[in-house]
Amino acid sequence: MNNRRETLKQGMTLAGLLASTGLFPQFAWAYNKTAFDAKSVADVAKAFGVSAPVASKDVTITGPDIAENGAVVPLGVSTSMAGVKHLLILVEKNPSALVAMFNVSDAVESSFSTRAKMGQSSDVYAVAITSDGKALFAKKEVKVTLGGCGG
């Protein structure tokens, strides 16, 4: 019993030490409230301090052509470019355009997937923001239908 209590105590001490040195992960560091509150693709770019995104074949967006359930639409973003610091997924007609932000570095494979809620058919964007301030995108139209049978 004492071993368990001692282990817990040491673990809490270590967590406190890591948090005080900045080595303990905290979600707030990666959070960009202005970008997540943005209503358009242009507003998201402005929140990241970049000009309007330019189309690029180096950025890939994946998702269904027709989503039968708009509550859980699988989307993916990837790039093989070096120097990318953020990968974003945006849904143009959502109340808040930015649905996912991934902080990346050259040390990780820049390929991510998630599920997003879409209230209606919309263009979906994958945006790569590079460390030199460029924004590159790929776009895909995703149709949201009741039952997935419409067009």
Image (cartoon, rainbow, N blue to C red):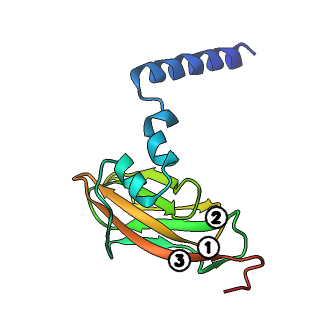
Instruction: Please give left or right for residue 37 compared with residue 5 in the image.
Output: left
Q: Is residue 33 left or right of residue 55?
A: right
At label 1, which amino acid type do we have?
Ser
CB under 8 Å between callouts 2 and 3? no
Q: Quadrant of residue 74?
A: bottom right
Which residue corresponds to mark 2?
118
Question: In the structure shown, which secondary structural element does the residue marked by tag 2 occupy?
Answer: loop
Residue count near mark 1 (Cα–Cα under 10 Å), binned few <14, some 14–19, many ≥20: some
The residue under label 3 is which amino acid type? Answer: Glu
Task: Name the quadrant of the C terminus.
Answer: bottom right
Q: Residues within 10 Å of mark 2 (few under 14, many from 20)?
A: many
Q: Position of residue 19 (x, y in %)?
A: 47, 23
Q: Are marks 1 and 3 in contact (CB under 8 Å)?
A: yes
- Identify which residue, 120 or 63, lies in the foreground: 120
Reading the image, the residue beneath label 3 is 141
Residue drawn at 36 percent across, 61 percent down: 128
**131 up-or-down from 7: above or below:** below
Q: Can residue 19 be seen in the rendering of this structure? A: yes
Q: Which mark is residue 121?
A: 1
At 47% from the left and 18% from the top, the residue drawn is 17
Q: Are the residues flagged by discs 2 and 1 in contact, CB closer than 8 Å? A: yes
Separation of residues labelled 2 and 3 (CA atoms):
12 Å
Residue type beneath disc 2: Met
Report helix, strand or loop for mark 3: strand
Mark earlier in primary sequence (2, 3): 2
- Can residue 31 be seen in the rendering of this structure? no
Instruction: Relative to 6, say whether 117 is above or below.
Output: below
Residue 117 image point, x, y percent: 65, 60
Q: Position of residue 15 (x, y in %)?
A: 53, 23
Q: What element does badge 1 sit on?
A: loop
Frontmost residue, 112 versus 99: 99
